[in-house]
Image: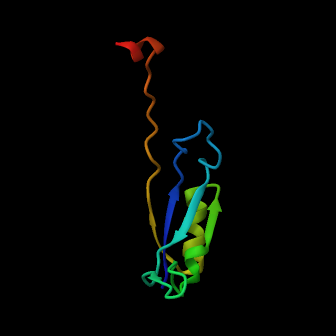
Amino acid sequence: MPTARIFQRPKNAMQSGKHRTDSWQLEFEPSEPKRPDPLTGWAGSGDTRDQLRLFFPTAEAAIAHCEREGFGYTVVPAPQKTLKLQSYADNFK
């Protein structure tokens, strides 16, 4: 039985936008390790579920999908959002 990981994507640290941070993502855990291709040297495996990512509006919808399809799952809680409040003058202390 394949196992999946359900998580909410964090905000990109390099940009100020919050695109797709409110949706929940489902990724499958790899069933076999990656190995280098002898010709190109790229890492790959025969597991095609590694390429699949599903997006859901809520964590409950993702859990319902896993239970309906018979997948095992683990839910990673959403990261805690903290604000670092400081003024511009704090840069020169």
Q: In the orientation shown, which residue stands out farthest toward the left? A: 93
Position of 15 with respect to 83 (left or right) is: right
**Vertical position of residue 48 compared to residue 23: above or below:** below
**Vertical position of residue 77 compared to residue 17: above or below:** below
| Residue drawn 59% across the image and 47% down it | 21
Position of 92 with respect to 37 (left or right) is: left
Residue 81: x and y in percent read: 46, 38
| Residue drawn 46% across the image and 15% down it | 87
Residue 51: x and y in percent read: 60, 74
Position of 8 with respect to 54 (left or right) is: left
Q: Quadrant of residue 27?
A: bottom right
**Vertical position of residue 27 compared to residue 24: above or below:** below
Count how many numbered circles sit on residues in the image.
Answer: 0
Residue 77: x and y in percent read: 44, 53
Q: Nearer the viewer, residue 23 or 13?
A: 13
| Residue drawn 59% across the image and 36% down it | 16
Residue 89: x and y in percent read: 43, 11
Q: In the orientation shown, which residue stands out farthest toward the front? A: 39
**Vertical position of residue 46 compared to residue 62: above or below:** below
Q: Quadrant of the C terminus?
A: top left
| Residue drawn 49% across the image and 81% down it | 2
Q: Nearer the viewer, residue 79 or 70?
A: 79
Q: How is the image coloured?
A: rainbow
Q: Quadrant of residue 40?
A: bottom right
